[in-house]
Image (cartoon, grey):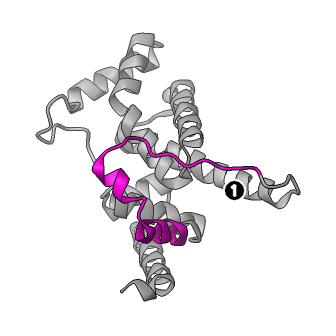
Amino acid sequence: MSDAVNGAAGAPTTENTQALIRRLKAGDEKAFDELVTEYRERIYRVAWRILREDEAAEDAAQEAFIKVFRHIGRFEGRSSLYTWIYRITVNIALNKLKRDRFRQMLPLGDLPRRERRPTADPARMAESSEIAHRIREAVETLPDKQKAVFTLKFYEGMSHREIADIVGCSEGTSKANYFHAIRKLRTQLEDLR
């Protein structure tokens, strides 16, 4: 995946991205602000799709940008900057899910959880329907890797090659995880057909 312009106004070109990476590696704080401005919404959205909580997604996105800033010197350019940031975000979100599951095993009582949407557009409002609620619940039951692959493919529209780069697996493994996720979701949601 490249960061070349795909017809979208304001999208980063390969040259602009390479210049941004050089500036980041040089410690330019303005470059970091530009990076956050460019990728903030997409990073938040992928974290939210995995974690399903505003505060947790915001924390994961912030942690991802901090890691990018601290470790930009290690970025070798084997993948695009965008893919590298997504991989960091997905790993942070998956690790947070694991930590949260462990904490839920501890007897802390029933703490109320709030679920809000990132924006109030019609697509988000439609998610409040009973069918969408059932689908979200079913997705939550998927193993972490399947959930990440399903989220990136179904909600973010990424290719299996991009997903493989982000999740850190082969393209075939990405396809297999997606296939198994779909099969499990179909089984769980059979009565909705």
Residue 141 appears left or right of 193: right
Q: Position of residue 11 (x, y in %)?
A: 21, 32
Q: Position of residue 69 (x, y in %)?
A: 52, 24
Residue 117 appears left or right of 123: right
Residue drawn where x is 59% and y is 71% of the image: 141
Callout 1 secondary element: helix
Q: Amino acid at mark 1?
A: Lys
Res 28 visible: no
Residue drawn where x is 46% and y is 34% of the image: 75
Res 12 visible: yes
* Residue 66 is inside the magenta segment: no
Identify the residue position indicated by label 1 in the image: 98
Q: Position of residue 46 (x, y in %)?
A: 44, 48
Query: Vertical placement of 53 versus 105: above or below?
Result: above
- Of 132 and 161, the residue lying toward us: 132
Residue 51 appears left or right of 182: right
Q: How many marks?
A: 1
Query: Vertical placement of 131 versus 123: above or below?
Result: below
Query: Vertical placement of 28 versus 180: above or below?
Result: above
Residue drawn where x is 58% and y is 33% of the image: 63
- Please report the bounds of the magenta region as a residue range: 111-139
Q: Position of residue 143 (x, y in %)?
A: 59, 69
* Residue 128 is inside the magenta segment: yes
Residue drawn where x is 59% and y is 35% of the image: 59
